[in-house]
Image (cartoon, rainbow, N blue to C red):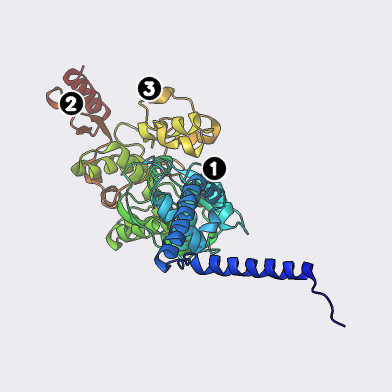
Amino acid sequence: MTRPPDQRRDLDDRRNARIRKMREERQGGARPRRPLQPVVLLAWFAGIIALLGVIIVIGFFAFAPQLMAWVDQHPGSIEHGVVQTFVRWYEPEALADNPKSDDGSRISVTVQDGASDADIADLLFDRGLIQSRLAFEWAVIQAGRKGTLQAGTYDLSPSLKPSEIVAALRQEAGPEVKVTIQEGWRLEEVVGYLRSTKLTMNVDDFVDLVENPPADLIRDYGFLADLRKGRTLEGYLYPDTYRLDANWDARTVLDVFLKTFDERLTNRIRHGIEKQGLTIDEAVTLASIVEREAVLDKERPLIAGVYLNRIQNPDGGGGTGGLLNADPTLQYALATNANRDASVADWGSIDWWQPLQTGGGDVQLPNRLSRFQTYLNPGLPPSPIASPRAASLAAVAKPATDRGYYYFVAACPGGKRDGSHYFAQTLPQQNANIDRARSECP
């Protein structure tokens, strides 16, 4: 039996055939797509990268000040290469080895045991000695001295470069400093002057050594053998021009002064002092008075002769009683008493040799300084009053005692003070010389 045709299936087949044909025609007639070109792709990526670079650079510049501020607050970070690169690019002057100022004043700082480089940087910055903690840390690194700075007390100046401060804190060789100690300066004047130099030694340490010389220092220098217990080294800081290392400590600097004194105290001077019946300390004491009185070198032996004649022959010259009548000893004692409470920092600004305001015999001194009253107490004062030069020491070693002079007074030839003196053997001659000098310079 034959099955009749399914009309619905024929319709579906024909519809599907038409759809397949339309798809084939559509696909066959469509324009083929072009592949994406490599150049276009590279350009696209380059644009993206450039945009990101711009964004990063803008962001970095915006963030750089904050980053630099962080480095300033953490100066130790400068040891890392990436930080060094950043600082050199962004703010290279922050690493410059420049002093904070040209102010030569000295500031004492004490570096404690165990202090880190950062602790020391903070100390120096807080005391106004450096303008940048970062520059100091960089100077430490450049010198290869991380963690090696030494504890101690130092006198530093804002005029020192960070690298010079690093050298000082290591007590390494520093720059040469020219120092000139003037003849006739007393101890306080020497110290006041040293404070104005670029020496980094602690001045208080120097003062302590001079005022309380240790036993080993006394033993090192034979000329100090006669120094009484409790005596300072007044008179022994030899006046001369020195070239010192800026970073020498107080003991080394003092040794230089004392060694120079030893060299200037020649065998001839030593023998002459012994011949006069004086100890070296007595000779230095007398030479210090001669130094303050004499202006002309040719008069030093004459002035030394006057004083030695008075000491050795108190009945001569009309009876001097062994009184030196030396105004400089009174000036020394008056200034010592008036400034007994002055700090070491003030010593350089004090006038230590003010003229007497009354006659020498009327000057009143406290008991502890009474022996400097040479108008009332015979013989030498208890210690030197200043630092004498070799010429004054030589004058004491070979005084012109044979002239028989017991008196002298400042002259004023032609109405002008030229440093010369009139000398006399007797009191009447002295009074005549006084009248003469007053007539020349009313």
Q: Where's residue 173, x and y in %?
A: 39, 62
The image quadrant of residue 168 is: bottom left
Query: Height in image: 199 above or below 21?
Result: above
Q: How many residues crowd mark 3 within 10 Å: few (<14), some (14–19), many (20+)?
A: few
Residue 156, position as x, y percentages in the image: 46, 48
Secondary-structure class at tag 3: loop
Q: Is residue 353 left or right of residue 211?
A: left
The residue that disc 1 covers is: 126
**Which label sits on residue 359?**
3
Eyeballing the image, is 41 above or below 55?
A: below
Question: In whole angstroms, how far apart are the C-alphas of marks 2 and 1?
Answer: 56 Å
Q: Residue at (34%, 32%) from the top-left corner?
A: 319
Nearer the observer, 232 or 195: 195
Looking at marks 3 and 1 on the same chain, the residue that comes earlier in the sequence is marked by 1
Q: Residues within 10 Å of mark 1 (few under 14, many from 20)?
A: few
Residue contact between numbered discs 2 and 3, judged by CB atoms under 8 Å: no
Query: Which secondary structure lies at badge 1?
Result: helix
* Image location of residue 292, percent across then percent down: 32, 38
Give the residue at the far left of this rendering. 414
Tell me: residue 241, above or below residue 370: below
Q: Earlier in the sequence, mark 2 or mark 1?
A: 1
Amino acid at pointer 3: Gly
Spatial CA span between label 3 and label 1: 52 Å
Task: Say whether residue 58 is left or right of residue 293.
Answer: right
Which residue in the rendered view is the most extreme toward the right?
Answer: 1
| Direction from residue 99 to residue 266 in the image, left or right | left
| Residue ID for mark 2 | 412
